[in-house]
Image (cartoon, rainbow, N blue to C red):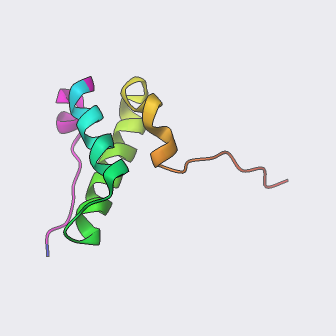
Amino acid sequence: MTVLHVEKEKVSTLTAADVEKLAARLEQDDYVNAFEGLNDWHLLRAIAFQRPELAAPYLHLLDMEAYDEA
């Protein structure tokens, strides 16, 4: 089984066009298996943490919301 390791170098080389293609794949949700979609989701999540300016338009795909635990 292949384990996804998202290296900082990979995320640092991505362009806005690359992230747009990634988001389009996630929105279409037409993957051969669930693991391919999960890999894309993890990559977008890594981009959101390491290069938030690229992922900002696509945060809705991550379902990342602030929670008030008070």
* Residue positioned 24% across, 37% down in the render: 21
Name of the residue lying farthest toward the bottom: 1
- Vertical comparison of 61 with 33: above or below: above
Magenta stretch: give its range.
2-16
The picture places residue 28, in percent across and down from the top left corner, at: 32, 52
* Residue positioned 14% across, 69% down in the render: 2
Please state, as top left, top right, bottom left or bottom right, where the N terminus lies in the image. bottom left
Name of the residue lying farthest toward the right: 70
Q: Nearer the viewer, residue 39 or 5?
A: 39
The picture places residue 30, in percent across and down from the top left corner, at: 26, 60
- Vertical comparison of 66 with 58: above or below: below
- Vertical comparison of 51 with 62: above or below: above
Q: Is residue 4 left or right of residue 41?
A: left
Q: Is residue 48 left or right of residue 39?
A: right
Name of the residue lying farthest toward the left: 1
The picture places residue 40, in percent across and down from the top left corner, at: 28, 52
* Residue positioned 21% across, 32% down in the render: 18
Q: Nearer the viewer, residue 12 or 39?
A: 39
Say how many tags the image has. 0
Please tell me whether residue 34 belongs to the stretch shown in magenta: no
* Residue positioned 32% across, 58% down in the render: 29
